[in-house]
Amino acid sequence: MRFGDDLMHEEIYRLFIRESGQATCFSFVVMGAVVAGAALGGAIATMSPNIADPQAVVLVMMVVAGIVAYAYKLIRSRPALSPDDIRRLLPLLHLDDGEQAYIDTLLALGENPSLSEETAAQIARELSTLLDTYYELQNQLDGLREAMGTASEEERENLRKRLKETEDAEARAALEESLQLVEQRLKSQHALATYVQRMEAHLELILQTLKSLRESLARLKLAPEGLNEFDVEQLRQRLLELRQEAAAIENAAQEVLSGRLS
């Protein structure tokens, strides 16, 4: 598999579309719809009281059909990209470290003549699934950070100090309840912090795995005789383990969150 093939194109465009969308195509469709509306309005304006102008109706249908067909072709068409073309596109995207490592690995995969088409396609599919796992971990990590809240030891100490200095019974009761709530928030925060650390560590592991694979592919390109040592099945197994480990962390974090809400 090389960059002229559909699967590799899907992977490259996947991040490009994720960051950039298809605003140009959308703008074209909108402008086309405006033109079509103007043409249709002109047709209606030229209608006789009882009978529409057949030529205007035909003209409108031709314009609309042409715009829709061209817009569809524009959206669906994907020009052949070389590795150098892709590298020139990369500065236009806002990629994080994991996405950059993913693209670099795909480039190394596409430029490696030592791997068979089937092997390269197999690795690309595994990498695509790993990227999905990377995104899922990122999303859940963001959710956990938000769920951790803003409770702090300083907040608890301030409440303890205020409680110690307060003599009014009702005020003390309110402060005691506030202190209990802060302590519950801190307890939940500490429980979630463990899974935040695990997710951050696993994201780093995925990043380092991608970088390691890219470097292995670069070495293989320079020394094709090392192909026998490049164990694709072992690589697939390792990528599978990474996804399973990520799923286990996500499930455990969900259980903690469910316990907080119950």
Image (cartoon, grey):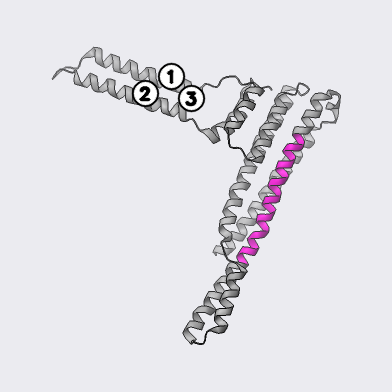
* Mark 2 Cα shell of 10 Å, populated few (<14), some (14-19), many (≥20): some
> How far across and how far down the image is residue 90, in percent?
61, 30
Asked whether residue 232 is in view, the answer is no
Q: In the image as oriented, which residue stretches furthest toward the left?
A: 49
Q: Does the magenta stretch include residue 67?
A: no
Q: Is residue 91 left or right of residue 55?
A: right
Mark 2 sits on what residue? 32
Question: Answer yes or no: do the residues labelled 2 and 1 have beta carbons within 8 Å?
Answer: yes
At a point 62% along the width and 68% down the height, the residue shown is 187
Q: Distance between the residues labelled 2 and 3?
A: 14 Å
> How far across and how far down the image is residue 196, in percent?
65, 55
Mark 1 sits on what residue? 70
Query: Where 138 falls versus 11 (above or below)?
Result: below
Mark 3 sits on what residue? 75
The mark total stands at 3
Q: Distance between the residues labelled 2 and 1?
A: 10 Å
Query: Where 257 falls versus 206 (above or below)?
Result: below
Magenta range: 187-213
